[in-house]
Amino acid sequence: MAALRVGIIGCGRLRRTEGATGFGMAHAHARGYEASADADIVALADINLENARAFQQEHAVPDLEQRLYTDYHEMLAQEALDMVSITTWPHLHAEMVIAAAEAGVRAIHCEKPMAPTFGEAKRMTQVCAERGVQLTFNHQRRFGTPFRRARELLRDGAIGELLRIEAHCSNMYDWGTHWFDMMFFYNDETPVEWVIGQIDSRDGQRIFGVPVEGQGISHFRYQNGVYGLLITGSKTALEASNRLVGTEGIIEVGHSAEVPLRLWNADTAGWQAVDTGAGLHGDDYVRMAVLDAIDALQTGREPELSARKALQATELIFATYESSRRRGRVDLPLDVEDSPFLAMLTAGDMIGNYEEAVF
């Protein structure tokens, strides 16, 4: 079987090199393709040709000038690609995903968040579904050892019946998309019934071009009766990234860098650190995400990071924003196309000084 022909849209720069403004996710994706015997990176597209050339040298992409493009449409038209990674800023995701699907690409692995509006997120998911294109979004923490071990403890009954899932991070859109996704991961992808939330624009930032709230809260209920709570902002009383509360104990993920996972129940006599051998973050999880997408394409199964799963997390982001706009509970499915937060900013209902965050 011939190796999959892979193209990268948005090469960027290696993280923490001169001129880098993000995490160098294209390079992390590339390491996933390089780890597979079933995929070859054969073409690169970036509006800055020097970025593409540097990427080509870093990852030993075939040294052919015609394989470097400043126009991704041209790359899609000429290269007969099987799979594409899209590692650009969120406002470009929808148009790039749809263009790749319409060009006949079989699989697309895109960075998160999905898009700046809920309508865009739904449209690219729908287009790919209609064309039989596998679409995944890089919620790579699903492959993280502490998160997977936490779910194993939960399934093994370590804390009894699950009652509530809590999480904390700086914002709902860029970082919160990960935690909303992980909350579904812990609760076996159970759908959410309703959301009630509030956001405040003070101390907000732009992250990869998209304004995010400075502080917020999202409270929601799953169909199985479990409750979810995400708190955003720099200061909260939640001393963990994720917390699973059960009838007989608590599991915490991300209590600290030294204790990525800990457990409390009747058998532990207080908090007990759980050895995971790995932390919460790392490019290795991105590599595993790419390998999973390749395997899913070849076997026909649903990938772990499918668009279906990403969309349910994205819905919670915009449902929380919509609850703040309506000043009331929002029952799902969500029936808006815009970003309520961006709409409120545009209308002057929220005011903030949004400078671009630097990573």
Image (tube, rainbow, N blue to C red):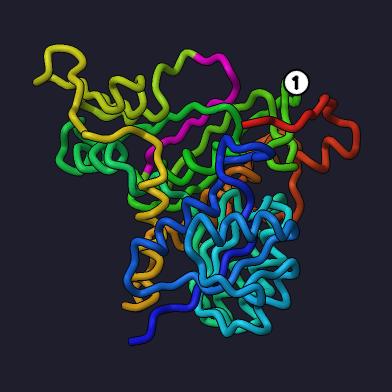
97 vs 165, left or right, is: right
Is 317 on the left-hand or right-hand side of 152?
A: right
- The residue singled out by tag 1 in the image is 202
Between 330 and 278, the one lying in front of the other is 278
Q: Which residues are magenta?
A: 225-236
Is 309 above or below relative to 70?
A: above
| Residue 355: image location, x then y, percent | 78, 29
Q: Quadrant of residue 246?
A: top left
Provide the secondary structure element on which disc 1 rests: loop
Q: Is residue 308 visible?
A: no
Q: Position of residue 283 (x, y in %)?
A: 41, 45
Q: Is residue 296 above or below residue 204?
A: below
Q: Residue furthest left?
A: 267
Residue 156 visible in the current orientation:
yes
> Quarter of the image containing the C terminus?
top right
Specify the quadrant of the image occupied by residue 161. top left
Q: Is residue 267 magenta?
A: no
Task: Tell me the amino acid under the disc marked 1.
Answer: Arg
Left or right position of 2 against 55: left
Query: Which x, y percent locates residue 316?
Result: 57, 45
Instruction: Name above or below for residue 305 compared with residue 4.
Output: above
Residue 210 vs residue 322, the one in the foreground: 210
- Taking the magenta stretch, the answer to whether it contains residue 231 is yes
> In terms of depth relative to the viewer, which is nearer, 251 or 247?
251
Work out whether residue 325 or residue 113 is closer to the camera in this orientation and state it.
113
